Image (cartoon, rainbow, N blue to C red):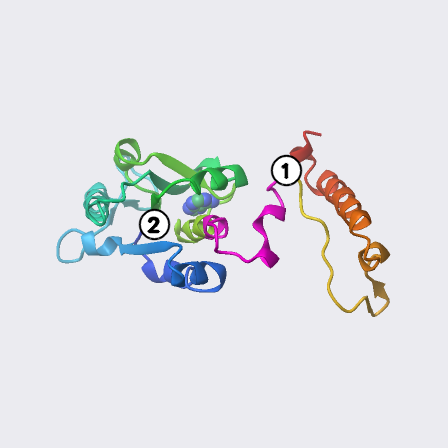
Amino acid sequence: MRIDIITALPHLVESPLSHSIVGRARAAGLLDVHIHDLRSFGLGRYRQIDDEPYGGGAGMVLKVEPLFDCLKAVMAESPDIPVDEVIYMTPDAQVLTQATVNGLTLKSRLVVIAGHYKGIDQRVRDAVVTMEISIGDYVLSGGELPACVLVDALARLIPGVITDAESALTDSFQDGLLDAPMYTRPASYRGMDVPNVLLSGNHEFIREWRERMRVEKTRRIRPDMLGD
Ligand code: ADE
């Protein structure tokens, strides 16, 4: 999969996508991430990329021309891999779910626009954006961290990226339930003991216990996921 990220703050995106599972996926050639600096498409001597909103109000809006020019340049790179979706990260959108992430893993190429300031000119959203994603009902100072969240969630589902020990299929959300509590050695620490069933070696008992814990935990923490 190829992902092109358009941002005014490339350094903010590069670091989180260079380590751990995403870094490994990139190094192994399983995920091809390209980060594009919107500033290089800025206008005039000062490479202007933002301006005041028409109609007034606080904050600045990312301008239409640098975004269109940058998108055109991005599309011209590797034209053999057509762009499946142009995604704009923004709080005024549907909230990202595991189902959306799963669906996106079927795509070959995504372009992700990380907005900044007060957002981007609506004409970009109307003309080229095919999907808008929020990572939650709170406002961050830009779309860079949300773009990294999206890429991380996607990368770990690409076949070959995570090892069996990290298995993505047993994650919380993959089958509509939160994950069970996990423990590792030692079996007893300062009077806090690992549940006996996990030490029993009886895989059937362990499986049943985990399933029960998942349902109980989901009911307690996220009853909305059970439709309660
Ligand atoms: N940009 C600012 N806040 C955001 C959010 N919650 N989700 C996606 N992009 C954003």
Determine which residue is flagged by label 1: 176
For label 2, the SS is strand
Quarter occupied by the C terminus: top right
Please tell me which residue lies in front, 142 or 166.
166
Determine which residue is flagged by label 2: 2
Q: Is residue 55 above or below residue 138?
A: above
Bounds of the magenta span?
A: 152-175
Q: Tell me how many marks there are.
A: 2
Instruction: Answer left or right for 136 relative to 173.
Output: left
Please provide percent x and percent y for residue 138. Answer: 51, 44
Instruction: Answer left or right for 123 relative to 11.
Output: left
Residue pictured at 74% horizontal, 41% vertical: 220
Is the CB–ligand 1 distance for label 2 below 8 Å? Answer: no
Please tell me which residue lies in front, 16 or 182.
182
Please provide percent x and percent y for residue 115. Answer: 35, 47
- Residue 157 is covered by the magenta coloring: yes
Label 2 Cα neighbours within 10 Å, binned few <14 / some 14-19 / many ≥20 = some
Is residue 213 among what the camera can see? Answer: yes
**Which amino acid type corresponds to the residue marked 2 in the rendered image?**
Arg
**Which amino acid type corresponds to the residue marked 1 in the rendered image?**
Gly
Is residue 116 among what the camera can see? Answer: no
Q: In this view, does 226 lie above or below 32?
A: above
Please provide percent x and percent y for residue 216. Answer: 77, 41
For label 1, the SS is loop
